[in-house]
Image (tube, rainbow, N blue to C red):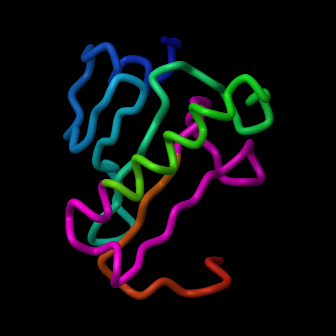
Amino acid sequence: MGDTLFGKIIRREIPAEIVYEDDDILGFRDVNPQAPVHVLFIPKQPIATLNDATPADAALLGRLLLACAAYAKQEGFAEQGYRTVVNCNEHGGQTVFHLHVHLLAGRTMQWPPG
């Protein structure tokens, strides 16, 4: 499951506030939230960056985004709106090299983000 911080969270070696889990995806609150709701969704199968995803990962990537949408609906902010973000590599802002989607909600998002 990878030797990153997120691999350790998947294996329950370090604590996280888990808010979503299915067979393939784990969702947990970001420890440094940038919005009132800031949840990270990760595939349990490690993929370092979006660049490392292959056509064989297409279904998993789809399930990753669908998990974000399901959580937004479950928590009641889907209709009001939310943002999903995938950072890729250093200049994209990625700091943990296990593909993840940031789900941000609970405030109005600005564009461009900065």
Query: What's drawn in magenta, residue-wise?
Result: 71-100
Quarter of the image for the C terminus: give it. bottom right
Residue 53, magenta (yes or no): no
Instruction: Give the left or right position of residue 82, taking residue 89 as reference.
Output: left
Q: Residue at image x 50%, y 42%?
A: 64
Q: Residue at image x 28%, y 33%?
A: 21
Image x and y of residue 95, in percent:
59, 41
For the residue pair 83 and 92, the one nearer the viewer reads as 83
Residue 87, magenta (yes or no): yes
With respect to residue 49, does 46 lie above or below? above
Image x and y of residue 24, in percent:
42, 25
Q: Residue at image x 34%, y 80%?
A: 79
Image x and y of residue 60, in percent:
57, 31
For the residue pair 77 and 98, the one nearer the viewer reads as 77
Please identify the quarter of the rendering in which residue 85 is found.
Answer: bottom right
With respect to residue 112, does 68 lie above or below? above
Q: Residue at image x 40%, y 47%?
A: 67
For the residue pair 52 and 69, the one nearer the viewer reads as 69
Instruction: Give the left or right position of residue 8, taking residue 96 as reference.
Output: left
Image x and y of residue 3, in percent:
51, 12
